[in-house]
Amino acid sequence: MQALAKAGQNGLQGTVQVPGDKSISHRALMFGAIAAGQTEIHDFLPSADVYSTMAALRALGVQVEEKEHDLVVTGRGGFQNFRAPKQALDFGNSGTSTRLLMGLLAAQPFDMAIEGDASLSKRPLKRVSEPLNQMGAHFDLRDGNYLPGTIRASAGLKAIDYDLPVASAQVKSALIFAGMQAEGTTRIVSPLISRDHTERMLRKFGGQIKVAGKVIEIAAQPQLEGQVIDVPGDISSAAFFLVAGLITPNSKLRLKKVGINPTRTGVITLLERMGAQIKLDKFQDDAEPVADLLVESQPLHGIEIGAADIPAAVDELPILALAAACAQGQTIISGAEELRVKESDRIAEMVKVLQSLGVDVEEKPDGMVIKGGRPLKTAKPEIALSANGDHRLAMVIAVAALVTEGQVNLLDPEAMRVSYPNFLQDLTNLMKVKE
Ligand code: S3P
């Protein structure tokens, strides 16, 4: 159990370099694995989820060397040069590893057993296996939808036209990887635009993909060539400091080199709608745009967050719910049913966390209604909260504790290893300015 710190008189002050983007780190490893030659990945995210992708690729015969903040991947030069793994591929807690690799490995000439931890084994995979099966892949999944399972050998894939039922970048990316190996042109239509890191990275590696709004067309590719990838800071990790800076009195923070891909910046847009001013500085653009984010404590007000807002802020909804609890007035979150099938049921879990801090919050099937503006306060002088093993909830609880009257303890701080192993250290450093 971890006793969580409360902010002092000076709030949070200073500069943070949040770790590398999780989505981009996974993809850089995967593209590096299928490219020819070496791929250097600078400032990758050294977290449990990314190590799950790395371990799976190594088990398939891909050489990955780790040198401090960088990785060097020696590619197999295509999809057909992998080695049959000797054991089940264990994806741990990582939905991204599972779903993207199901697409990347859909046409191998051998069977592969796949498994994950208890949380991952509850998350739906049919959304990926169904379209891939239509293309000629074969998956055996527990109850047709869950890990553990087997990716069966396939004799080859054929292109399909597919309307995604959910705006999921993971499903879209799995279909892009499969479409790259299929005969013909695969057409993927998304209900809403989701993160486009796979599309951008494919182009960076010399590949071709047609993107027209929500419609993507993908076919066989020229040989991809190894690249140098600079991974930007993860905006999903920066989001915890954005909200911490806004709700903790007397704070002033600079978050350095954060990825600001427009398919990911929903958290900035939504905080601005709540009345926040977030400044962007030192803008740079390679395959992915990057900037420093500057934030100071400011009053916020409640807003309505609907289905169209969700994909660009899907992982930031828990911390936005905390911002809403600290804002004046009511915030309604709707159209967010996807949150129920993340690393935990993030609607139910956030409602529980906020209620433990004295917040007036009502659970809805697709979101929640938060009546904000009351100071956060524990019912007893000291309470212990569980993040239910969910990394993002663990970090939300740590941010909430900064401004809560009463001592908050966290039962499972190790959950943060999934995306931000040093979060508590980085947060504590911002409280160390001299009084
Ligand atoms: C991710 C996509 C999102 C997100 C996840 C990472 C990705 O999932 O929640 O943390 O890297 O593609 P969905 O696309 O399934 O919503």
Image: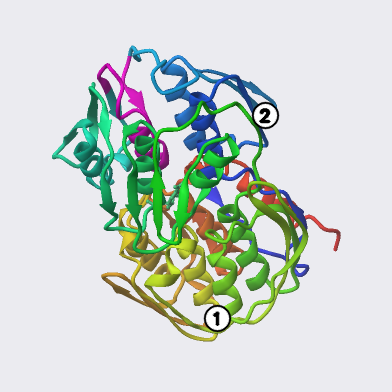
The answer to whether residue 55 is above or below residue 215 is above
- Amino acid type assigned to the residue bearing label 1 in the image: Ala
Task: Using the rendered view, name the quadrant where residue 88 is placed.
Answer: top left
The answer to whether residue 299 is above or below residue 175 is below
Say few, some or many: other residues with alpha carbon within 10 Å of mark 1 (under 14 / 14 to 19 / 20 or more).
many
The residue indicated by pointer 2 is 70
Q: What residue do we see at 51% from left, 55% from top?
A: 409
Residue 241 rendering spot, x and y as whole percentages: 64, 60
Q: Could you tell whether 50 is left or right of 8 in the image?
A: left
- Look at the image and tell me whether residue 427 can be seen: no
Residue 326 rendering spot, x and y as whole percentages: 55, 77
The answer to whether residue 297 is above or below residue 197 is below
Q: What residue do we see at 28% from left, 17% from top?
A: 109
For the residues bearing labels 1 and 2, Cβ distance under 8 angstroms: no
Q: Could you tell whether 332 is left or right of 291 in the image?
A: left
The residue indicated by pointer 1 is 327
Q: CB at mark 1 closer than 8 A to ligand 1?
A: no
Q: What residue do we see at 62% from left, 56% from top?
A: 238
Task: Using the rendered view, name the quadrant where residue 9 is placed.
Answer: bottom right
**Magenta residues?**
87-112
- Amino acid type assigned to the residue bearing label 2 in the image: Asp
